[in-house]
Image (cartoon, grey):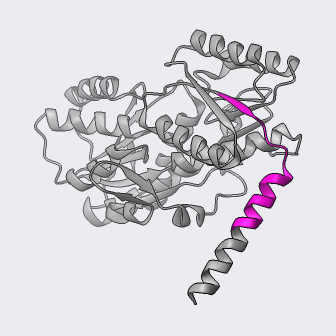
Amino acid sequence: MALITKLLMASAAIIIATSAQAANMPKKIGYVTNYATHEWYQNVIKGMKAHAKELGIEVEVQDANLDIAKQVSAAEDFIAKGVDVLILTPVNEEGVVPLLRRAKAAKIPVVLEGNPVKGMTTLVAICDYDTGYFAGVEAGKYAKQKLAGVAKVMNVGLPLLSATVLRSKGFMDGIRTEIPSATLVHDLDGGGNPDRALEVSAAALAKNADINIIYGINDSSALGGLQAWKAAGKSQDNLLTVGTGGEGLAFINAIEKEPSYRIEAAMFPEKEGFTTIDAAVKVFNGEPVPEHIVSPTAPIIGDSWKTYYSYDGTTRSIKWDAVNALKPPAKCMETSADLKK
């Protein structure tokens, strides 16, 4: 059996190598991320670089640090250097449009990550609405069992980006499939970061603390909202906190330590980075690609995070077999275009 296993592994390695050689690989990819200090993007980059290394591709990363002017400057630098493919995570959607035109003029293909931009060729991203929706369904089930069927939600959102607006909308639509009377008590702009999320959540709770569910469009938002709740001296006994992202260690620590943090809408950033490199290879070779290449998500309930990640107390490692077994939808339930209708 051991010999057969080794032969099968060797055959698989040959197939992978042959597939890689069949494509003409780009030599260098330039990636301008919007916020490299964030755990999500650190793990996207980790997935990118790991897969690129397997394919013999160099990936250089520049950080816009949430500054569109820096993003434009970094992207223009990559274009001037003549990278084979440019990958962008938009700081904002309108500010990136001119970059797409400049890259096209320089005959450099572009792959977007995370957020759509008018005139794009392809985008690697989750289905944001679906991600929020299925987390909302699970939150509704939880509220039926643990919260007496009552759902009063504080949404710690981010209205700047259509992707995060879709998550919040999906969450409320999902929870109402289980609890039609679910109400949105507070709809906040948490800025996507813990300090801002804490600030606005504390102010909202000071005005009206009659909520029992905190939903955050990313982990920082959910944790900022929960921190505000705790700072007000409130018990977590009749509270549910729902995060989004599974961005890094924060959500694992929260699920393990915070009684109310029971649901995570996991988005698997390592997988998204891996898929983005595959998309870059395809556009470099002029292969047809869909406008939206969907990266999978899944609601995680309690310690079921262990299905997808291992954690040694210091670092986490993705369980690729489990994540690769997830099947993304062929089509998103709702998209940014639906928000404009």
- In the rendered image of this protein, does residue 249 appear above or below residue 63? below
Q: Where is residue 240 in the image (x, y as percent from the top left)?
A: 28, 51
Instruction: Tell me which residue sits at (38%, 40%) in the image.
Output: 219
Q: Where is residue 176 in the image (x, y as percent from the top left)?
A: 46, 54
Residue bounds of the magenta highlight:
13-30
Q: Does residue 128 show up?
A: no
Instruction: Tell me which residue sits at (49%, 19%) in the image.
Output: 65
Q: Who is closer to the viewer here, 1 or 71?
A: 1
Outermost residue on the left side: it is 233
Instruction: Tell me which residue sits at (75%, 39%) in the image.
Output: 280
Is 53 placed left or right of 238 in the picture? right
Tell whether position 16 is magenta: yes
Q: Position of residue 92 (x, y in %)?
A: 60, 21
Is 280 placed left or right of 9 in the picture? right
Q: Quadrant of the C terminus?
A: top right
Specify the quadrant of the image occupied by residue 317: bottom left
Specify the quadrant of the image occupied by residue 73: top right
Outermost residue on the front side: it is 3
Instruction: Tell me which residue sits at (67%, 79%) in the image.
Output: 7
Q: Quadrant of the N terminus?
A: bottom right
Tell whether position 117 is magenta: no
Q: Does residue 42 show up?
A: yes
Q: Who is closer to the viewer here, 52 or 115?
A: 52
Q: Where is residue 243 in the image (x, y as percent from the top left)?
A: 38, 46
Outermost residue on the bottom side: it is 1
- In the rendered image of this protein, does residue 226 appear above or below residue 132? above
- In the rendered image of this protein, does residue 18 appear above or below residue 234? below
> Total of numbered circles in the picture?
0
